[in-house]
Structures are given as structure tokens and as C-alpha cells.
Image (spheres, helix red, strand yellow):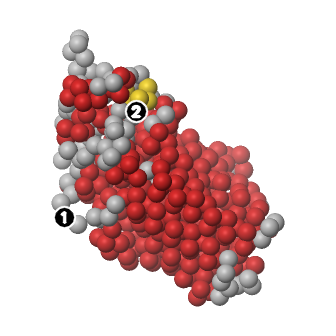
């Protein structure tokens, strides 16, 4: 695990601290149904509102991290999330609870693009996949600690756990503020000697980048499939006559496998082609979810979880690194934000459709449908993104205001990063000249101080816990 910059490890530590206190999403459905006496339907709606907030928070955080800075975006988002967690310890009105959870979704997801952009800023391209994998491992390790520790500490009460999350999230913000330098690349001086704030890109501008748009759409398919087991699996196991406790044991396999084997999987795959890994992981999702329709025992359900969990371990860091590769330097945050929005949308679609399909056409239709969607994604990666992610696609697709989109053919060198930073809109007419005339990107600014499983089982007992599990895992997976 050597070779990564010191700033990355402070970011890694902040991630671990943040997720170790992730009690709200873990126990939200139980808090709403058991302590406040709301219905399971209302609990599921509130969890969905958290995902809805994430859909708005991801592009907002991406925009802020590019224009305001990575560090202030992270600090503000963490402090806002801490305030929301503390508020949940005192509010009781159904409208107030829903509003706080919605705002918490915005705040939590606004941090993710800044984290992804910071890793891309700090870590050379050849090490980014490993860095994203380590950050994802910290997310899952922290979440597992929260689930186990929170379950053991339930005697303190849900409200106390929510206050503990507020404390942990505030500590995370403090680590970022004190130890993590600002990494947003400085833009060149204009003719008047002033620093331009950079092009004003919207979400639609980012989606005009053809290869990245394809990556986002395929990721939406994969994320929807990936989020489905957290809702559909407990319903399917109940349909087979198995208990909620059996579901808890089966879904615990996901966290155990990730915490135990993520680093090994990364070592095995770190030199492989990103397209091959995206195809392979999508096929693993297809096999794992499709096989769920064919099994009926606790052991075999656990085997299917192992299969799609391996797909998850391969997919998440590779997809994050692919996003960083396709993003121009000045828009890394916005690209990460749009990708995070795709994950949030997929996490929102899955709980809505899974319950309807299981209760209507039946579990088999749900799982065979997931397998078909994952295979479509695998074919899309193989046919549509091979050139873009292998370095064969020419750079310079415009997105807005005379700025090119991703230079997918660039390598990790400083020269190619500079060529991707600012390219005239007419770069397609003379790409070599445009690249050679692009001003170099300045060294990142140093303006600041430079120096789980039990919850899933419990949620399943309430009927609404499946939705809570989907929301929780969706948060974990958006690196």
C-alpha cells in the first residue's frame, strides 16, 4: 500500500472515521417504525427521500468542488450532514423528519464528487485505481464497524447513536480542514493577469461528452442491478419461506468478502484492461443475480452474494478511475458529480421496481431481468468504450464555452493532463496544435493548512429495512 501521497491517507482516514459513525442510514427504518411509531410505508418513503437528495447533491457537490474548492466543499458537506444527524435526535414530526433526511441526502452526496476529484488530483493515473479501491475498502470497513458497533450499542438508544454520528462526521470535517491541502488545480492567468474561474459547465454540458455519457448510462444500468439485491433479496428469501435472520446472515457475506478480499482483488486486477474489468464485473453481476432466481437455500443464496460481491469489488474502483480518466482537469468534480448522480438514480429506481416486480410477476422475473440488464451493460462496455478507455480515442470533444471534454486518449503524464485542461472548441481541426498551445496546469494550490450486516438483518424484520439497506449500500458504493 506504499507509493501513495500522504494527503491521500489523510483523506482515507477521514473516510474511515466518517463511515464508522454511519448510524443514521443503518438504523433509520427501525428508528422510524419502532421508536416514532410510523408505518413501514412511511419509513421506505423517507429512505427514498434520502436517495432523492443524493440525486441533487452529487452534481451540486461536483460544481462546488470545481469552482469553490475540494476542501471547502468537503468540510461544508460534512458539517451539514452532522447537523442533520443531530437534528434527527430531536425532531419527531413526520414532515420535519422527511425534510431533514432529504437535506442529509444532499449533504452526504455533495461530498462524494470532491473526494473523487481529490484522489484524481493527488494520485498519478497509474495508481488511481488502487487509490479508489483503498478508499472503497475504508468505506466498507467503516460501515461494517458501524453496523456491528451500533448493534451492540443499541441499548444507548437510536437518538444517542445519531448524536454519535454527528460527532464522528464533525471529526471527519476537522481532519479534512486541518490535514488535507486544497488540491484543485489552479487555472492559468488570462491576458489581464487575472485567474479565470474556468468555464461554467452544467450537467448537460458534461453529458455532451460522448464517451463519458456512455459510461454514465452503462453505470446507471449496473448500479440499478447492484442495488436490487438489497431490496429484492429479503423479499425473495421470505417468498421461499426463509426467515429474516437467514437474510441477515446471507447479506453479511457481502461485507465480510469486501473487507477480507478487496485488497487482494485489487492486486490481481490492477494491471488489467479497464474495459475487460468492466465487462467481467458486469457479467459477474449477471451471473450472481440471475442465479438468485434458481436457488432456494440459505447456503446457495450466500453463494450468489459472493458472485456479485466479487463483481462489486472489481467494478467500483475501475469505474471511478475511468471517470477520472475521462474528465478534463478543470471539470473533475463535475464529472464525478454526474457519475454520482447516476449511482443515486439507480439506487432510487431499484427499491421502487424490485418490490413491485416481486409482488407482481414474481422473484424469477426480477432476477432474470437483472441478469439481462447486466449483460446489456457488459456488451455496451465491450462495444462502445473500448477505444475511449484504452487510449485510442482522440481527445477534444467540446462540451461548453470553448472547452473540450475528456481527453480519453491521454496518459497520466503532466503534459497530457495539461492538454486536457483547456482545449479550444476548434481543436478537432488541429488537435495537435491545440494541445501544444494549451497552457500548463499549475501545481495544486496549497492555500490551506498542509500539514454491515446486522443492520440489514434488523431492517428486514421491519419490512422496510430492505429499502434502508439499498440506501445504505448505495451511499457506500459511490466512491
In this orientation, which residue lies closer to the viewer: 44 or 362? Answer: 362
Residue 426: image quadrant is top left
Q: Position of residue 326 (x, y in %)?
A: 37, 44
Q: Position of residue 404 (x, y in %)?
A: 37, 30
Q: Is residue 12 visible?
A: no
Q: On screen, 267 above or below 11?
A: below
> Which residue is pictured at 40% across the width and 53% down the height?
386
Which label belongs to residue 397?
A: 2
* In-image side of 84 versus 211 (left or right): right
Which label belongs to residue 134?
A: none
* In-image side of 145 versus 470 (left or right): left
In this orientation, which residue lies closer to the viewer: 276 or 129? Answer: 276
Q: CA distance from mark 2 to mark 1?
A: 36 Å
Which label belongs to residue 2?
A: 1
Q: For the image shown, how many numbered marks are present on the structure?
A: 2
Q: Position of residue 276 (x, y in %)?
A: 40, 62
Q: Position of residue 132 (x, y in %)?
A: 35, 58
Amino acid at each position: 500500500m506504499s507509493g501513495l501521497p500522504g494527503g491521500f491517507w489523510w483523506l482515507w482516514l477521514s473516510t474511515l472515521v466518517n463511515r464508522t459513525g454511519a448510524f443514521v442510514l443503518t438504523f433509520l427504518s427501525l428508528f422510524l417504525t419502532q421508536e416514532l411509531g410510523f408505518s413501514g410505508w412511511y419509513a421506505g418513503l423517507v429512505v427514498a427521500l434520502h436517495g432523492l437528495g443524493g440525486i441533487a447533491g452529487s452534481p451540486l457537490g461536483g460544481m462546488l468542488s470545481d469552482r469553490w474548492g475540494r476542501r471547502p466543499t468537503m468540510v461544508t458537506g460534512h458539517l451539514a450532514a452532522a447537523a442533520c444527524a443531530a437534528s434527527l435526535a430531536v425532531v419527531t414530526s413526520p414532515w420535519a423528519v422527511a425534510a431533514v433526511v432529504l437535506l442529509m441526502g444532499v449533504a452526504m452526496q455533495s461530498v462524494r464528487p470532491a473526494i473523487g476529484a481529490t484522489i484524481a488530483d493527488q494520485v498519478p493515473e497509474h495508481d488511481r485505481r488502487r487509490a479508489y479501491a483503498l478508499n472503497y475498502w475504508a468505506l466498507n470497513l467503516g460501515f461494517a464497524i458501524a453496523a456491528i458497533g451500533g448493534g451492540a450499542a443499541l441499548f444507548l438508544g437510536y437518538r444517542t447513536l445519531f448524536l454519535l454520528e454527528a460527532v464522528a462526521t464533525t471529526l471527519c470535517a476537522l481532519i479534512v480542514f486541518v490535514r488535507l491541502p486544497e488540491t484543485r488545480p489552479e487555472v492559468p492567468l488570462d491576458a489581464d493577469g487575472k485567474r479565470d474561474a474556468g468555464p461554467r459547465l452544467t450537467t448537460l454540458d458534461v453529458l455532451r461528452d460522448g464517451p463519458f455519457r456512455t459510461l454514465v448510462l452503462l453505470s446507471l444500468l449496473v448500479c440499478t442491478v447492484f442495488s436490487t439485491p438489497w431490496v429484492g433479496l429479503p423479499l425473495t428469501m421470505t417468498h421461499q419461506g426463509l426467515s429474516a435472520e437467514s437474510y441477515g446472515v446471507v447479506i453479511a457475506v457481502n461485507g465480510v468478502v469486501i473487507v477480507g478480499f478487496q485488497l487482494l482483488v485489487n492486486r490481481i486486477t490492477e494491471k488489467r484492461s479497464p474495459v475487460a474489468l468492466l465487462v467481467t464485473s458486469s457479467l459477474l453481476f449477471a451471473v450472481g443475480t440471475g442465479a438468485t432466481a434458481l436457488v432456494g437455500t440459505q447456503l446457495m443464496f450466500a453463494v450468489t452474494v459472493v458472485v456479485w460481491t466479487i463483481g462489486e469489488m472489481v467494478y467500483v474502483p475501475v469505474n471511478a478511475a475511468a471517470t477520472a480518466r475521462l474528465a478534463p482537469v478543470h471539470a473533475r468534480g463535475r464529472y464525478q458529480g454526474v457519475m454520482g448522480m447516476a449511482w443515486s438514480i439507480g439506487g432510487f429506481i431499484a427499491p421502487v421496481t424490485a418490490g413491485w416486480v416481486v409482488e407482481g410477476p414474481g422473484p424469477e422475473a426480477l432476477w432474470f431481468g437483472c441478469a439481462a440488464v447486466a449483460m446489456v451493460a457488459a456488451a455496451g462496455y465491450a462495444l462502445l468504450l473500448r477505444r475511449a478507455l484504452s487510449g485510442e480515442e482522440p481527445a477534444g470533444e467540446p462540451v461548453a464555452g470553448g472547452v473540450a471534454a475528456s481527453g480519453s486518449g491521454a496518459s497520466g503524464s503532466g503534459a497530457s493532463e495539461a492538454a486536457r485542461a483547456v482545449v479550444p472548441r476548434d481543436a478537432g481541426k488541429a488537435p495537435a496544435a491545440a494541445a501544444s498551445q494549451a497552457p500548463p496546469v499549475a501545481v495544486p494550490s496549497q492555500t490551506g493548512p498542509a500539514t454491515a450486516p446486522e443492520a440489514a438483518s434488523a431492517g428486514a424484520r421491519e419490512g422496510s429495512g430492505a429499502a434502508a439497506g439499498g440506501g445504505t449500500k448505495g451511499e457506500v458504493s459511490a466512491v
